[in-house]
Image (cartoon, rainbow, N blue to C red):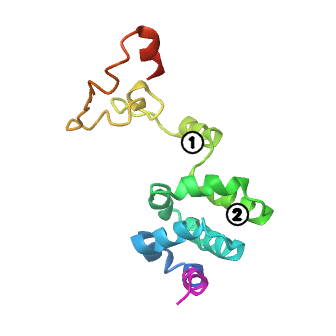
Amino acid sequence: MDVHAIVTRLRDLSKDPQNRSAIAKDEASLSGLVLCLSNEDPNIVLISLEALKYLAMYTPNRPVMKNHMGMIQSLQALSSNENAEVVRAAEDIHSSLVPSRAAQRSKNVNSPVVKGVPSATGRGAFFLGQNNKNAKVFLIEINGVFPLLTSNQSRRKC
């Protein structure tokens, strides 16, 4: 089976709302669609974007898709594509997965504030791994890489 047939089949399956959740949860299907976004054939890219658009229509799929490796980067890379239709489709999907800051603020204004629960805009959300107590930071120091460079001016080059 060629790439065009596979992507077309995934798009046709994603048109059915009952299949959208299963396709988004399937790592291979989602990875295949993301991989096809970098294909040289603009038809394959458009079909992949159409399938992703159908998957993003189902709101519970959006966090899965947003966190999928390479999804957001591939959509952003398509924003500089020559084909206007590809750019428009990629921006539509990107905006559905990553809402604008204005939309997030309007949601925060209307949401109730619960005492004792830190908000997403509060200071506690500054560090991503703040809640992970098992996180470790490693510092690697390499000595002897440039043993001949001893002056401060030479060290700045490194």
Q: Amino acid at mark 2?
A: Ala
Query: In front: mark 2 or mark 1?
Result: 2
Residue 130 in the image, given as x and y percentages of width and height: 31, 33
Report whether residue 135 is seen: yes
Residue 32 magenta: no
Q: Is residue 110 left or right of residue 69?
A: right
Task: Find the distance from the CA under tag 2 to the CA under tag 1.
Answer: 25 Å
Describe residue 139's horizontal placement relative to residue 110 as left or right.
Answer: left
Q: Secondary structure at mark 1?
A: helix
Q: Residue 97's image quarter?
A: bottom right
Quickly name the residue at label 2.
89
As drawn, 78 above or below 36? above
Q: Nearer the viewer, residue 140 or 69?
A: 140
Name the residue located 39 percent from the left edge and 34 percent from the top edge.
114
Numbered circle sitting on residue 107: 1
Relative height, residue 42 to residue 95 (above, below): below
User: Which amino acid does the dot numbered 1 rest on?
Assistant: Lys
* Residue sitting at the far bottom: 1
In this view, the residue in front, 63 or 109, is 63
- At 45% from the left and 57% from the top, the residue drawn is 69
> Range of the magenta residues?
1-10
Tell me the number on the disc at residue 51.
none
Q: Closest to the observer: 157 or 131?
A: 157
Task: Residue at 62% x, 68% y: name it.
Answer: 53
Q: Is residue 3 magenta?
A: yes
For label 2, count other residues whose C-alpha is less than 10 Å away and answer few (under 14), some (14-19) or many (20+).
many
The secondary structure that most of the magenta stretch takes on is: helix
Residue most extreme to the front: 148
Callout 2 secondary element: helix
